[in-house]
Image (cartoon, rainbow, N blue to C red):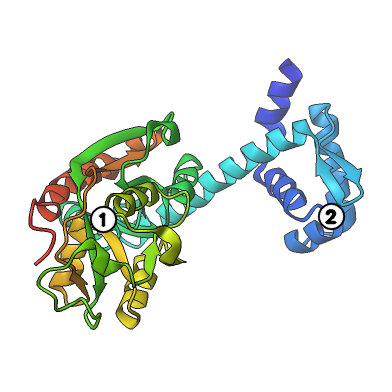
Amino acid sequence: MARLEWYIRANLKPRHMQLLVALDDFRHVGKAAAFLNITQPAVSKTLAELERGLEVTLFERGSRGLVPTAYGRCLIRVSRSVLRDLDAARDELRQMRSGSTGRVRIGTLPVAAPALAPRAAIRLQARRPGTAISFQEATADRLLPLLREGLLDVVVGTLPPASMTLGLETAALHPGDGVAVVCGMGHPLATRRRIAAADLLPYPVVMPPLGSIFRATVEGALAALELTTASAMVESGSMTASNTYLRETNAISFYSRHLALHYSRVGMLRVLPIAVPGAALPIGAVWSRHNEANPAVPELIDCLREVAHEVLEAEPAYG
């Protein structure tokens, strides 16, 4: 045990970690060597030295090439984490040299992408000039793993269930947002002053993707309105794609109320005059306690909380 600890602390270098990751990615000595711009004998020699020093077998040869053992998978996982941290340190140093005073990587669920997250980021930069911001939009099942891996600092949007955020920090930014029905400005129903649920039946529905948090809410709304999911012709986790599809077809969709109002105000979509039954969706932020050392993260949470109350004001969902 003492030798193992000594070897890892004294002899395990970033080049070894790069080698392990490359072998895991390519499962072939020659391809890994070409990627690392070294010779095949150098790869084999370094791997043998690692296995001898650690006193374990890291890879075995199988029918599909090199296959990591349990020991190998452990060290590869750690190597990927360390290399990501080194990349993050490189990027942060580069930004500091260019005048940046920090960086925040924000993962946005579709509900937070158009207004909540960018407005909070603008407010943060006003308070902390020089802070670099990056956005990545996706559904929670894609963003939360990136947060756990340290590739994001905060995820913002509909608050995921506790089963998805075990070991992470969460904050409710707003108690909830209702649901509205939207369509393109040229839709046959767009100029109607009153509509009934039956009026929606002829039109296809753009649905949130399966597995997304908002999917169950929309399915519940359809059931409450006695509509069917049979007309769900498109699934979309992208606000840009959904908006374009709605503008250029006679489809309808279900948006969080504040998003529906936002797109109505800017003239992109029409909010249909029909009340949608259903529970409000809490809006929140999720982050890792490891990121609390970044002073911009708690300040961003404060900005998100302020902006959430501004953009999620209780207003009529249609008109």
**For residue 258, what is the image quadrant?**
bottom left
**Residue 223 at what x, y percent from top left?**
33, 50
Taking 116 as reference, is 79 above or below it? above
- Give whichever of 14, 239 is nearer the camera: 239
Q: Which amino acid does label 1 sit on?
A: Ala
Q: Which amino acid does label 2 sit on?
A: His
Q: What element carries label 1?
A: helix
- Looking at the image, is mark 1 or mark 2 nearer the viewer? 1
Q: How many neighbours does mark 1 have within 10 angstroms: few (below 14), some (14-19), or many (20 or more)? A: many
Q: Which residue is drawn at 34% across and 40% down?
A: 286
Q: Earlier in the sequence, mark 1 or mark 2?
A: 2
Q: What element carries label 2?
A: loop
**For residue 173, what is the image quadrant?**
top left
C-alpha span from label 1 to label 2: 43 Å
Q: Mark 1 near mark 2, Cβ–Cβ under 8 Å?
A: no
Q: Name the residue under label 2.
A: 28
Which quadrant holds the N terminus? Answer: top right
**Residue 213 at what x, y percent from top left?**
38, 47
Q: Mark 1 points at which residue?
A: 117
- Give whichever of 4, 139 is nearer the camera: 139
